[in-house]
Amino acid sequence: MPGRPSASRRSVLRGAAATPLAGLGLTACSVPGAGGSVAATPTAPVELGADSEVAKGSAKLYRDHDVVVGRDAHGTLKAYSTVCTHAGCPIDRLQGTTLICPCHGSEFDALTGKVVRAPATEPLNALPVRTANGKIVAGPGA
């Protein structure tokens, strides 16, 4: 039709790519805390396992709760959300004390939460952690 601009290839592809996600109410590469679909978990104290499961200088991934717990050389426990700070993906792999995100390959130190390999630039979200009755408890109010 004369006088009416045609859609560019880019705008057609952008619309086609966004349509399936919009119908599901999902967003690609959502970041926790920025209105994305993945929340930094847990939202309440959760019992993870026996205190003896995490030795000094090691870490344990609790996939069911999106939490990693590490114990430094002094015996201090630290817990972090395993929701990647780059794209909001749940991290499901722990190699030694290194967490590896399956989405874009970001790596984090499970003992400190710090980024050790990009593309992530922000450390993992720290969670309160304690022991109670021989169990590790992590999350808000822990």
Image: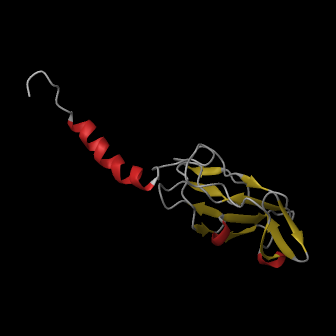
> Which residue is at 35% across, 54% downward?
20
Q: Is residue 51 left or right of residue 90?
A: right
Q: Residue most toward the right?
A: 133
In the picture as drawn, the residue positioned furthest to the left comes out as: 2
Q: Is residue 94 left or right of residue 29?
A: right
The image quadrant where one finds the C terminus is bottom right
Q: Nearer the viewer, residue 14 or 131?
A: 14
Depth check: 105 or 140 in front? Answer: 140
The N terminus lies in which quarter of the figure? top left
Please say if 96 is above or below 120: below
Q: Is residue 5 above or below residue 40?
A: above
Query: Residue 108 appears at what percent x and percent y?
Result: 62, 55
Residue 120 percent across, percent down from the top left: 56, 47
Is residue 14 toward the left or the right of residue 98 in the image?
Answer: left
Q: How many badges with numbers are in the image?
A: 0
Q: Position of residue 52 (x, y in %)?
A: 82, 78
Q: Position of residue 17 (x, y in %)?
A: 32, 48
Q: In the depicted view, which residue is nearer to us: 12 or 1?
A: 1
Give the quadrant of residue 53: bottom right
Residue 33 vertical position relative to residue 24 in the rendered view, above or below? above
Colour scheme in the image? secondary structure
What residue is at 74 percent from the left and 69 percent from the top? 58
Left or right: 90 with respect to 21?
right
Q: Eyeballing the image, is 29 above or below 128?
A: above
Q: Residue at x 85, y 58 (%)?
A: 141
